[in-house]
Image (spheres, rainbow, N blue to C red):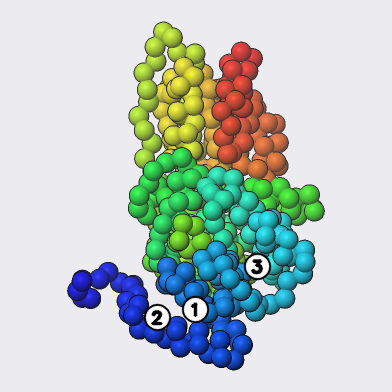
Amino acid sequence: MRFDELKTPAYVIDEKMLIHNLEILHKVEEDTGCHILLAQKAFSAYAEYPLIGKYISGTTASGIYEARLGAECMGKENHVFAPAFTDEDMDGLKNDDLEQIVPIFAFSSKSYVTDICRLALANIERFVTSDFYIDRIKHISQLEYRCLAGQKLEGDLDIIVGFASVGEQTAIVDIANGFSHSNISNLGIEVYDAIGEFTNCISGLFATAISKKGSMLEITPQFAYENQFAKGDAYVLPIHIHDSEVLLFISASDETKAGDMPVVRKIMAKAGGEVTLDSKGTVVIVDDSGMSRKILRDILEEAGYAVLAEATDGLEGVLAYKTYYPDIITLDITMPNMDGTEALKEIKAYDSNAKVIMITAAGQQHKVIEALKLGAKRFITKPFDKEEILKNIEEVLEG
C-alpha cells in the first residue's frame, strides 16, 4: 500500500504499535486497580474500538452522540460529561422524541426560532428520513455558504427561513429528493425548487400556528442564492443526514440579508398534452414551482385529464387561459410577477364563468378567503394529496 495513493481524509494506524501501547495501559490497570478510559473527542477510527476494548475499561464522551458511539462500538464503561440533562430530557433523547429534543438543542430567546426548528425537523422525519441527528443551534452574524434556498415571511414578524449547504451537498439534495420523490444528483435549480417548496410547507404551518395567536404573516415567493454570504442576526441548526450536514437558517432580525444576487430558479413550463375523446376534462396548471407542476400534472394525467399547458407565474397563467380556454385552471397563490389572486381577478374579468381552483400552502387562509370571494371554486393545499385533488377537480367540473 502506498500512502500517497490514499484518498483523504484517511487515518493510518500502526496496529502493532497500538497493541504495544494498549498492553502497557492494561498492565497499569492491573497493577493499580484504576480504570483507564478512551477519551473519544469525536474519535474517528471506531473500527479499532473492539481491539482497544480488550485492554482498557471503556470510553468517555462529551456529548450524547459520542456516548452512543462508545456504547455501540465498544460496549464497556461509558462516562458522559456534558451539560446536565433532566430525567425528562434523557427520556426524550433515548426515545427520539422531537418535542423534547428540540428545546434542548434549539433553544433561543426568540421562541419562534425553536418553533420553526420543531416544524422543520418534523417534516424531515415525515418526508425525508427519520435517520438524522442535530447539533446545538448556533447564533451567528454571518454565514458563507455554497447555496441557500428558502423564502421570507413578512408581516408582524419578518423572518427568513431556508436551508444552507456550506460544504458537502448530500444532505440538502436528500431533502430535495425526499420531498419531491425525485432522483436529483447535484445542486441546481431542481434542488432549489424542491427546497423552496419544502420550506413553503414549513412556513405555512408556522404561519397557521402564529395566526392563532393573533399575528399575521405573508408568505413570499421562494429564493435561492449560490456562493454568497448571509449577513445579519440569525440562527443555524446543524442537521446531519446520511453523514452529511445541512443548516436550517432562521433570521433573527428584519435587517438580515440572505444574499445579494439571487439565482433565477425558474424551471421552464412543459408543453401541453393531447386531448382525446376519452379525456375527462382539460386543465391549465399555473405554479412557479416546476416540482409542484410535475406532481399535479402526473396526478391529473394518470386520472385521465388533459393538461393543455403549464405556466410559471400569474402573467403567463392569464395568457394561457385566454389561449387555451380550459375547463379548469389551477392557480398557485404565491408566485412572482403576478400572484394567484391578481391572476384570478384578470381571468374572471375576461370570463366570469371561468372555473378556477387555487393552490395554497397552509397559513394563507386570508388569501384563500379573498380568492373565494373573487370567484374561485375551490382550493387545494400543499403538500398535495391525490384524493383531495381529484375530488375537487371532479366536483368543480360537475358544478
Mark pair 2, 3: CA separation:
38 Å
Query: Nearest the camera: 376 or 36?
Result: 36
Q: Are the residues tagged 2 and 3 within 8 Å (C-beta)?
A: no
Q: Residue at x 55, y 64 (%)?
A: 72
Q: Is residue 146 left or right of residue 240?
A: left
Query: Nearest the camera: 309 or 52?
Result: 52
* Label tally: 3
Query: Nearest the camera: 130 or 235?
Result: 130
Mark pair 2, 1: CA separation:
9 Å
Residue 113, image x, y percentages: 66, 63
Q: Under tag 3, what secondary structure?
A: helix
Label 3 environment density (alpha carbons within 10 Å; few <14, some 14–19, many ≥20):
some
In the rendering, which numbered label is found on residue 19? 2
Residue 347, image x, y percentages: 54, 29
Q: Are the residues tagged 3 and 1 within 8 Å (C-beta)?
A: no
Q: Which residue is mark 3?
A: 105
User: As displayed, is residue 397 above or below residue 236?
Assistant: above
User: As displayed, is residue 359 above or below residue 96?
Assistant: above
- Quadrant (top left, top right, bottom left, bottom right) of the N terminus: bottom left
Q: Are the residues tagged 2 and 1 within 8 Å (C-beta)?
A: yes
Q: The residue under label 2 is which amino acid type?
A: Ile
Q: Under tag 2, what secondary structure?
A: helix
Q: Is residue 190 left or right of residue 352?
A: left
Query: Which marked residue is nearer to the observer: mark 3 or mark 1?
Result: 1
Q: Which residue is mark 1?
A: 55
User: As displayed, is residue 180 above or below residue 355?
Assistant: below
